Amino acid sequence: MNRSIPIALALCVCSGVFAQRQLYALKKSDVGFVSDAPMERIAAANRSASGILDITARDFVVRIPMRSFTGFNSPLQLEHFHENYVESKAFPNALFEGRIIETADLAVPGTYRVRAKGRFTVHGIARERIIPCEVVVAREGVRVTARFDVLLADHGIRIPRVVQQKLAGTVNVKLDLLFEPAPSE
């Protein structure tokens, strides 16, 4: 089963409106983060995000499976990421759900600088966020790019004193998402 279908249904049910929706499904994703600490730089990427964008209402949901991050400096870093920091068994996904708060007609080709406002959940802790984005509407679909910082303490991720020089308290996140028209059923 296509994993974006439950997200699309939840989006429709939560909004209470089924008619006049233009749903776009996330087809290509590149989500990465960098921790730039004094003694070590850690970078990882994920190309397994799923999501839905309603270009009419400007609502969206994006889910990022934590176990799909790759690119750590060592297998031990990857193990610590999953077991000690994001605890991916208990919290398998990061989630960002919300809406684009500027009035922009995403059915019209062009480039839009907008802000996405919503609940950003990592490590089971949701925080309200406003993230500046660039949205490019073209024949291929709707491409969303953004860069933003995540303070680990905001999501209950503790950094033990012994590794504070190797893991930054704030990580930089970069995303590049391509949404294409969802198949109508």
Image (cartoon, grey):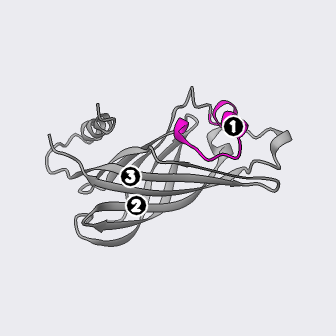
* Spot occupied by residue 156 in the image (x, y as percentages of width and height): 66, 38
* Spot occupied by residue 108 in the image (x, y as percentages of width and height): 23, 69
Q: Residue at x 64, y 54 (%)?
A: 34
The numbered mark, 3 or 2, whose residue comes first in the sequence reads 3
Which quarter of the figure has residue 155?
top right
| Residue placed most toward the observer, 106 or 44 | 44
Which quarter of the figure has residue 149?
bottom right
56 with respect to 87 (left or right) = left
| Residue placed most toward the observer, 28 or 130 | 28
Quarter of the image that includes the C terminus: top left
* Spot occupied by residue 32 in the image (x, y as percentages of width and height): 55, 53
- Residue where numbered disc 3 is placed: 28
174, above or below 110, in the image:
above
Q: Residue at x 34, y 35 (%)?
A: 3
43, above or below 82, in the image:
below
Write down the region rendered in magenta. 66-86
56 with respect to 145 (left or right) = left
Cα distance in 3D space between marks 1 and 3: 26 Å
- Residue where numbered disc 1 is placed: 75
Pointers 1 and 2 in contact (C-beta within 8 Å): no
The numbered mark, 1 or 3, whose residue comes first in the sequence reads 3
Query: Which amino acid lies under the numbered mark 3 shown in the image of this protein?
Result: Lys
Cα distance in 3D space between marks 1 and 2: 31 Å
109, above or below 50, in the image:
below
Marker disc for residue 144? 2
Query: Which amino acid lies under the numbered mark 1 shown in the image of this protein?
Result: Pro
